[in-house]
Image (cartoon, grey):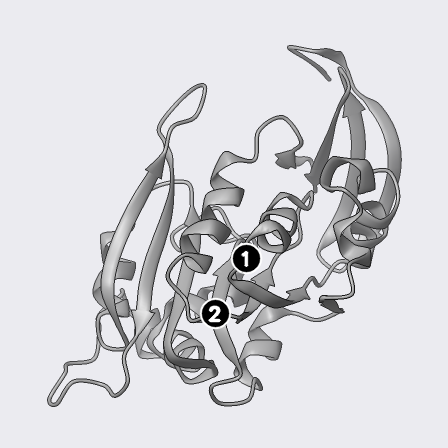
C-alpha cells in the first residue's frame, strides 16, 4: 500500500502476542502496523513527548516513572531528558517492539533502551500494574490504546475502570501523577478518575490532520474523599 511518502518497505513481519506485527519503512520514516492497522510512526511524537513531560513536571522528583507501551521510543527518550525523572520502568508486551527499538529504531531515540536508568518488563501492563507494590511509582504514563473508548485489546478496558484506576492510584506515591494518551477527549474517564485522582485536566495536542490528540492527567489523592461515589464509566467501571 502506497502512502504520501511512497511505497512501504517491510523491514520485518512477525507474529506477536496480539497477532501480526509489521515494522516498515516509508520515505525515511518507520511505521508499526498491527493486524493490518496502522499504530504509530516516527514522523511526529509531540503527544507522546507531552505525555511524559506533563507527568514529570508535576510528579515528586527524583521520580520513578512507568511507561506502558514503548512504541517508537519517543516517550522514553523524553523521560530520560527530563531532570525530574530518576528511573524508568518500561512495560511492553510485544518482544518484537523491544527488539526493533534496540535495532533499527535505536537512532530515532538515541538508543534510550540501553540507558542504565531503564528497566524493561516483558509483560502485559494490566497484569503488571495489578501486582505493583504500593507507592512504588511517582508517575504512570499509559500509551497502549487509542484511548479509553478505543482499546487495542478488550482486556485493556480494565485500566480505565474503577478497579484499574484504583490499582494505579495505589501504585503511586503521595502526589504521584497518572497520564493517559488518547485520540479524543473522554469525559467518562475523567468522571471515573475523580474518585482516586484530583487536579484532573485534558491537554490537547494539535495534529497535522483531524482532531487533536489529548493527554488526560490526574494527581493521586492521599485518601479517597469521604462518601465519594463509585464512578459509572458504562458497566465496565464496576469491574
Q: Earlier in the sequence, mark 1 or mark 2?
A: 2
Q: In this view of the protein, which residue sits in the foreground, 114 or 101?
A: 114
User: Of helix, strand and loop, which one carries label 1?
Assistant: loop
Q: Is there a contact, CB below 8 Å, between mark 1 and mark 2? A: yes
Quadrant including the C terminus: bottom left
Residue behind mark 1? 83
At 35% from the left and 41% from the top, the residue drawn is 184
In the depicted structure, whether residue 42 falls above or below residue 68: above
Query: How many other residues sit within 10 Å of disc 1, few (<14), some (14-19) or many (≥20)?
Result: few
Left or right of 15: which side holds 185?
Answer: left
Left or right of 127: which side holds 236?
Answer: left
| x and y, in percent, of residue 189 in the image | 29, 60
User: Of helix, strand and loop, which one carries label 2?
Assistant: loop
At 77% from the left and 44% from the top, the residue drawn is 21
Q: Residue 61 — which label?
A: 2
Quadrant including the N terminus: top right
Amino acid at each position: 500500500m502506497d502512502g504520501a511518502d511512497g511505497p512501504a518497505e517491510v523491514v520485518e513481519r512477525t507474529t506477536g502476542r496480539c497477532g501480526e506485527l509489521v515494522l516498515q519503512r516509508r520515505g525515511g520514516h518507520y511505521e508499526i502496523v498491527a493486524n493490518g492497522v496502522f499504530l504509530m510512526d516516527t514522523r511526529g511524537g509531540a503527544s507522546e513527548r507531552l505525555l511524559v513531560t506533563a507527568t514529570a513536571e508535576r510528579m515528586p522528583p527524583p521520580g520513578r516513572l512507568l511507561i506502558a507501551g514503548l512504541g517508537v521510543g519517543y516517550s522514553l527518550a523524553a523521560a530520560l531528558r527530563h531532570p525530574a525523572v530518576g528511573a524508568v520502568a518500561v512495560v511492553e508486551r510485544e518482544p518484537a517492539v523491544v527488539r526493533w527499538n534496540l535495532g533499527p529504531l535505536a537512532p530515532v531515540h538515541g538508543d534510550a533502551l540501553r540507558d542504565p536508568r531503564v528497566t524493561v518488563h516483558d509483560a502485559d501492563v494490566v497484569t503488571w500494574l495489578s501486582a505493583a507494590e504500593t507507592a512504588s511509582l511517582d508517575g504512570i504514563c499509559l500509551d497502549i490504546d487509542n484511548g479509553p473508548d478505543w482499546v487495542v485489546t478488550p482486556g485493556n478496558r480494565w485500566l480505565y475502570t474503577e478497579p484499574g484506576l484504583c490499582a494505579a492510584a495505589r501504585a503511586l506515591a503521595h502526589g504521584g501523577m497518572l497520564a493517559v494518551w488518547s485520540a479524543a477527549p473522554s469525559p467518562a474517564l475523567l468522571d471515573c478518575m475523580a474518585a482516586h485522582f484530583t487536579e484532573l485536566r485534558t491537554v490537547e495536542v494539535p495534529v497535522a490532520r483531524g482532531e487533536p490528540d489529548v493527554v488526560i492527567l490526574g494527581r493521586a489523592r492521599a485518601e479517597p474523599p469521604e462518601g465519594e461515589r463509585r464512578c459509572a464509566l458504562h458497566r465496565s467501571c464496576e469491574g
